[in-house]
Image (spheres, helix red, strand yellow):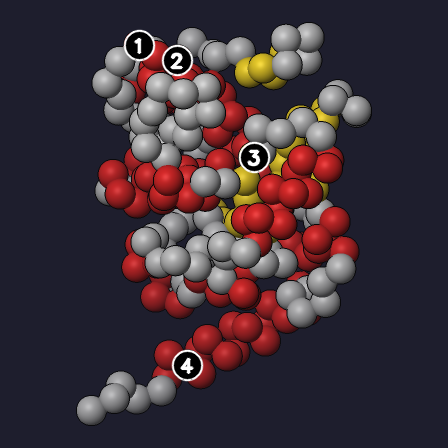
Amino acid sequence: MYNADEGSWNPVLIDHQHTLTELIQSHGSDYDFPLGASPNDNDAFFGLCFGHFLEGELRAEDDELVTRLFFGSDQESDQKRRNKAFQYDKLIQLIKKQEFPPEFEELINNHMLYLDSATAEEKSKYGNVYPKDVAPNQRHPFLSALFMISGYTSKDEVEKQVDMLSKRLHPNLRNRMAVYYFSLETERYECFDEHLKLAFLHRPSNYLQKMRVIRLWQQLPSPP
């Protein structure tokens, strides 16, 4: 939990892989993607959730980037993992509230956690939330959205983070990103959406158009 007086995240008591598994299961099948994913896909998935992609190697510095939430090598890493587990749990709670920006209207009552394994290590990143009403064989990464939780607590810091992260996303995803953060100003979690207010190419009205384009693309004959 974020402690405003101390200016830091206080860890929750998650001591074992089994407990983390139960935490993930408690959110239901639409949010249990990490349980069936490979270690590499889990690294990529949690990296998207925290905004540092596949750079989450276990280190001892204070700015540790931890993606391997299920496995650890020492007590210090375990404490950092607990912090990340709390943040991840909070992110899922915020997603489940469905207080989405208008640009993500098509995901209301229609979303699930997912990572397209084929794109996990691509330089340009995609999202971690997909529309639920799309068949698995039509689950194209262009339909995804990136939902992440930031460790920053001021709007200005989050804005800089969004600007940095958007440069690493696939161009089709740069206006498909929602960033939650605990605001010291309002003392509650907020969704940063300033970048969405300036975007016009990825509005919900384009959702069906994207689906049509993807389906046409899938119907094209394979090259000889």
* Residue 172 placement (x, y as % from top left): 54, 65
Residue where numbered disc 1 is placed? 75
Quarter of the image containing the N terminus?
A: top right
Residue where numbered disc 3 is placed? 149
* Residue 140 placement (x, y as % from top left): 42, 65
Please identify, in this view, whether the residue under mark 2 or under mark 4 is nearer the observer.
Answer: 2
Q: On residue 197, which mark appears?
A: none
Residue 47 visible (yes or no): yes
Q: Is residue 186 above or below residue 122?
A: above
Residue at 45 percent across and 40 percent down: it is 52
* Residue 60 placement (x, y as % from top left): 35, 19
**CB within 8 Å, label 1 to label 2:** yes
Residue where numbered disc 2 is placed? 79
Find the distance from the CA under tag 4 to the CA under tag 1: 49 Å
Binning the other alpha carbons within 10 Å of mark 2 as few (below 14), some (14 to 19) or many (20 upward) gives: some
Q: On residue 217, which mark appears?
A: 4
Residue 130 visible (yes or no): no
Residue at 58 percent across and 58 percent down: it is 174
Please identify, in this view, whether the residue under mark 3 or under mark 4 is nearer the observer.
Answer: 3
Question: Residue type at mark 4?
Answer: Trp
